[in-house]
Amino acid sequence: MNKEYDNYINKIVSNIGLSGKKARRVREDLYSSLIEKQQITGETNPYILMGDPEDIAEEFRENIGMESETYLEYKSKLNILGVHHYWYEYKSKVNIMGIPLLHINCKPMGVAKGIISIGSIAIGVLAFGGISIGAISFGAIAMGILAAIGGISLAGLFSIGGIAVAFGVSIGGLAISKLMACGGYASANIAIGGISKGVISIFKQSGEGRYLFDNSSNLKEIINTIKEVYPNISEKIINIMEKFISLFLMS
């Protein structure tokens, strides 16, 4: 065992007041956690990796009933305490305008704020989290200025999710957008879906709109209608739409 890690772990165990098998279990888990965090971050200082030994020992004393628990209960509580990454937090030393380039916060309901952020709640340019907010976001609930991908996703330009809402393009089970939506239920100026509602509606089961096309319609006729109704849409966007519509008609 790394001597520095050994001394660090000894301080934690002695502050908890453990001995015998339980002390060995704690040592093994703490050492594994230190090694794992070292491999991820490249940091070797145990105090930076996990924090003050007295604080960690106090968390153990407050959260673990050592006398009555089973080993599985003990392991579960270790997970809650953050061993094996559950309370892992890392901030890169590189900052841009005072904001960490990378911030990882895996504490329960921990908030990560960085250019790249990863956490239960993540806020950043590129955000990954249970709840994520950023320019580009990925998460159970994702909100992105440019793009969002998640169970529930809200975005300015592009959104993919079970429920997807965007100003530009949305794709999902329930897709709502200003310009184009594609999904089981789609609502947009150009709506493509099983059930669709829009100015131009391309549908399988039912559709509402000024221009209606079922899935047996001619692709060129649909594209020509889009160009006629929305002449300001760029050719690149039209080409992307054509691919989406072609796939829909073939499905």
Image (cartoon, rainbow, N blue to C red):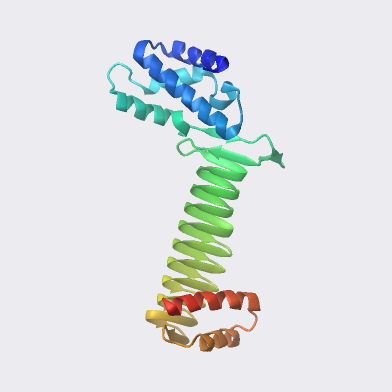
Residue closest to the far right: 97
The residue sitting at 48% across, 35% down in the picture is 107
- Residue 88 image point, x, y percent: 51, 33
Quarter of the image for residue 2 reads top right
User: Is residue 82 visible in this depiction of the protein?
Assistant: no
Q: Nearer the viewer, residue 209 or 46?
A: 46
Q: Is residue 119 left or right of residue 80?
A: right
The residue sitting at 43% across, 28% down in the picture is 81
Q: Is residue 122 left or right of residue 215?
A: right
Q: Is residue 14 above or below residue 125?
A: above
Q: Nearer the viewer, residue 110 or 102?
A: 102
Q: Is residue 169 left or right of residue 213?
A: right
- Residue 134 image point, x, y percent: 58, 52
- Residue 220 image point, x, y percent: 53, 87
- Residue 98 image point, x, y percent: 70, 39
The residue sitting at 50% across, 20% down in the picture is 55
